[in-house]
Amino acid sequence: MEFEERLAALATKVQNQRDAIQTEEATKNAFVMPFISTILGYDVFNPLEVVPEFTADVGVKRGEKIDYAIMRDGEVQILIECKSSTGQLKIEHASQLFRYFGVTNARIAVLTNGEVYNFYTDLDAPNRMDEKPFLVLDLADIDETLVSELKKLTKDAFDLDSIISGAEELKYVGALKREIAGQFRDPSDEWVKFFTSRVYDGAFTQRVREQFSTLVAKASKQFLTEQVNDRLKTALGATALPVSSGPAAAEAIQSQPVAENDLDRDTEIETTLEELEGYQIVKAIACAEVKPHRVVHRDAKSYFAILLDDNNRKPIARLHFNGKKQKYLGLFDAEKVETRHPINALDDIYEHAESIRDAVRTYA
């Protein structure tokens, strides 16, 4: 299994088991040890590679233990401190890492709750752990640009010099990306004022602040949507087509079980960009359970089908986008009976993510 596949598999495991993990010890056993083993490639049962409950006396602090120390050639290289997956990581949780970092040869320290991994080094002052991580790995939302950097920390490709040399750029680029993402989700007053001052000539009063807080958030979301659509158009070699909209129907509509021969192609079929965009969303959701290449689409006259393994006996969803007004997302139960759910926008598909994953799990 390739590195990216192992990482995706662990992310799925964390997602599926998160609610059942309630303690720090359970977090270590279920999530952190598999991370050290399957992702970083170290033998968690070999004390020459991984030392659990690592002890190093620190000044007046005697007998304190760090959860894991990863060894190379008899020297400590990476320190890992774990917290329960039920809580958010805070710098206050890293007090032991700060103390141990200065009295061992470790240049990398990790603070984790099993889902988020914060990697630290000593960019600001030698032998003193930085307060801000240079790399943040979130298994709930993996940043693909960080995968190559994570590989450098693995047993087979460990390259400390390369890690440290690139850590400063990673630290600030990552922090900037997280800050920008946060502003897109929930714009601060400074962010709102910054953009308002460039498009509005009047005084920045409380009324203007309230008005433009909504407008800036709306414009940000539309901008991101348009960027995604432009990428899809480029990838698909297609041109934009008008998107119709209409009021949502009051109730979902149930249809008959799937007919296994009703997906035959027809010369009058026209696949739209909107259908392909909807397919990409369903595929992204389904990939939490199966590899991407297994999720395929077939267009029919009256609907756009999304299937597992290109098998019409394994329907995942249907897109009913051919109507002039209302659009529907068709989902299937265990008996392959389809229920159509009204949607007003493609983003509404995400509201049915669990049903999509349930359909995939039924076949997989």
Image: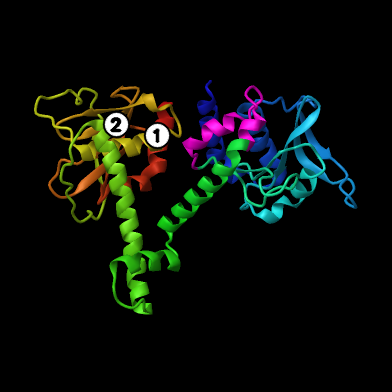
Q: Viewer-proximal residue, 308 or 331? A: 308
Q: Position of residue 100 (x, y in %)?
A: 79, 44
> Is 347 left, or right, of 169 in this rendering?
left
Residue hosting label 2: 306
User: Disc number at residue 88?
Assistant: none
Name the spot of residue 247 as percent of width and height, x first. Answer: 20, 56
* Above or below 227: residue 263: above
Residue 293 higher or lower than 326, as above or below: above
Q: Quadrant of the C terminus?
A: top left
Callout 1: SS: helix
Let me know if residue 75 appears in the view: yes
Q: Is residue 34 visible?
A: no
CA separation in Å, label 1 and label 2: 10 Å
Say if mark 1 contacts mark 2, CB within 8 Å: yes
Percent x, y for residue 250? 24, 55
Q: Does residue 162 show up magenta in the picture? A: yes
Check disc 2 and give the amino acid type: Ile
Q: Which residues are magenta?
A: 141-164
The answer to whether 321 appears left or right of 175 in the picture is: left
Name the amino acid type tagged 1.
Ala
105 with respect to 223 (left or right): right
Q: Determine the image quadrant of residue 13.
A: top right
Mark 1 crowdedness (10 Å alpha carbons): few <14, some 14-19, many ≥20: many
Residue 237 in which image quadrant: top left
For image coordinates 67% across by 54% down, the residue present is 91
* Residue under numbered circle 1: 286
